[in-house]
Structures are given as structure tokens and as C-alpha cells.
Amino acid sequence: MSRMGDVLAGIHATWEFDSDSVLIRFERGIRTPKLLSALGERRIPHEALAEVTLTPGKRGTVVLHAVPRRGADPLMDAAAGQLKEGCDPYRLVLPAEREVLAEYYADELRAQVRAAGTGAGFAPDEPADRFLVAPPQGPLQFKAYDGKAGFDGTQVTFRWFWTGASSAKWKVGDQSFPVASLGGVEWRSPDFFDGHLRLLRREGSAEGGTAAGPADQDPAAVVFGLGYGPVHESLPFAAAVLAAVRSTVPAAAALDRVPVDAVGAGRRDPADIAERIRHLGELHQAGLVTDEEFTAKKAELLEQL
């Protein structure tokens, strides 16, 4: 077993191996991806990991990759697979001449991950039932194209900019969303054309649990754009909100908010079923519902048609 405090330094990051976790410290510098610099450091419990891989990298490097379990890290759940490789905080890039050393640590970490799963009674590839990695500490505000988003730990606020907000958003005015009224967060990377951050309302809230069309028309969303809502600002923000929502609404409770009629209650309106499936998809995308739960609940809903 690796000794507590063993350190493996790579490009842009250093991993320190402890008895129950890996402490990842990211460098701060102009060559370090801004997201990694913004994260600073993160402690990853062994029980938050699914597997550990070591693969050849680019330009004479190898990549040690600690793959997180689904549902274990609010940052990765909010990212939903949209991060570029260089911004993945679970990848440690090393010079190829350190491959033997990297393989040693990869083997040790694999053993610790397996032991953590055995001790807690779960398989490492099983989704986590709660977040095991702390959410990023900040930033708690950022500028989007059409407004300024803020989060104080209990509510999210959107303050519209007259230069970018649509008339629909100006009509309803600035918005405040208590965490207790939210069911999830949808983050669409600013690297894409339609980048945005949308708050998914909890079913039963005043908004009825629905999202209102395109992000530029939805008062529960802010739109990104060139220079607005960059990944290193908007993604940690989304992760912090998602973690707050999850602590208020456990995944099982969120799933229960996609109701299915009792057997024998008769056929439902297809439009109503479609709306419930859409809402279920939002919960799934936000990380509040597992793949298995999504498939099973969707099948139940379709049976009502």
C-alpha cells in the first residue's frame, strides 16, 4: 500500500495519496486551464471513485485517470460529460518516463477503491446515492450575456442586463429562486452555441415544475455568449447550486415527484404523459435520477398510454 502523504506530481496538478482519499492540488498559472486554477484543490474519497486507468497521452505523456462514480461529484454531474479532456479534474498528465511510477500508484489506488467499496457494501461502478465530493467554494456569482447570476447558499438570483435580456425577461423582472423550490440545474457549456444555465423547478412549486422554452425566453435561465458565463465561473456555480438542491431534495424524493397513476386508474392524456416524461428527463440530466430509475419510471409512464 502507498504510504499516507505519498505525492505524485504531474502537469498542472499534484496528487497526494492518503489512507482514505486523494488530495488533488491544481497549479495556478497561465498554462493551467482556468477551471483547474479556479478549483484550487479537491479531496476525493476513495468511495467516490469507480475505476482508475493509465493510458498513453499526447506528446510523450501518460495519463492517470481516476474515474468518479456517477452521482458522487456535483461538479461532474453538472458538467454532464461536456468538459474537454484538458479541463477534466480527474486526469493527471505525466511525462512518459514516469510511467512505471504512475502504474504503481494506479495499482495501489485501484486496490484502495475496491477496498472502499467492499467495506461500504457497494460496487465501485454503482451510482452514489449522495454527493461524496465537496462542491466548489466559488465563485458565487458570474456575468452571463443577459444577466448576472448570484447564489448565497439558500437562493439563486438573476438580475437582467438591459443590453442583453429579452423582452420576456424584462417583463417578469429580476428573479429569485429559493433552493427549496428547485429540482435541479441544467448547465450547457458556453463552448456550445446555445450555452446557458437553467434552473429546473421542483414539481409542486409555484412554477409547476416546468421549463419555459428557449433559454433566452425563460426567466429561470441565463444565456452565455462570447466572454460571458465561462466554464471556470459558470460550472462551479452550477455545481454549488446542484449540491444545495441535492441536500434539500434527495434523489429518491425527486424521483417520487414524477408520479404514476395507480393501477386501474385508466388511460392518461398523452400530452400529460409526455410532459411527465420530459420532466423525468430533466431530473435525469440534472443527476437526480439514475439511468436505471429513469428507464424504469419512463416505462411505467408509457404503459399508461
Image: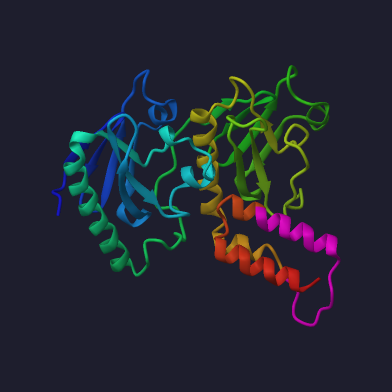
Residue at image point 47% right, 54% down: 71
Q: Nearer the viewer, residue 229 or 251?
A: 229
Does 290 sit left or right of 273 as displayed? left
Q: How many numbered discs sit on the rendered protein?
A: 0
Res 72 visible: yes
Taking the view exactly as shown, the residue that stands out farthest to the bottom is 264
How are the residues colored? rainbow
- Please determine whether, in this image, residue 81 is positioned above or below residue 193: below
Residue at image point 56% right, 49% down: 245
The spot of residue 297 in percent (x, y) is 65, 68
Residue at image point 64% right, 24% down: 225
Q: Nearer the viewer, residue 53 or 60?
A: 60
Residue at image point 84% right, 74% down: 267
In the picture, the quarter occupied by the C terminus is: bottom right
Res 203 visible: no
- Please determine whether, in this image, residue 23 is positioned above or below residue 159: below
The spot of residue 45 in percent (x, y) is 32, 51
Does 10 sit left or right of 162 as displayed? left
The spot of residue 196 in percent (x, y) is 64, 34
Does 231 sit left or right of 275 as displayed? left
Q: In which quarter of the image is residue 269?
A: bottom right
Specify the segment rendered in magenta: 260-281
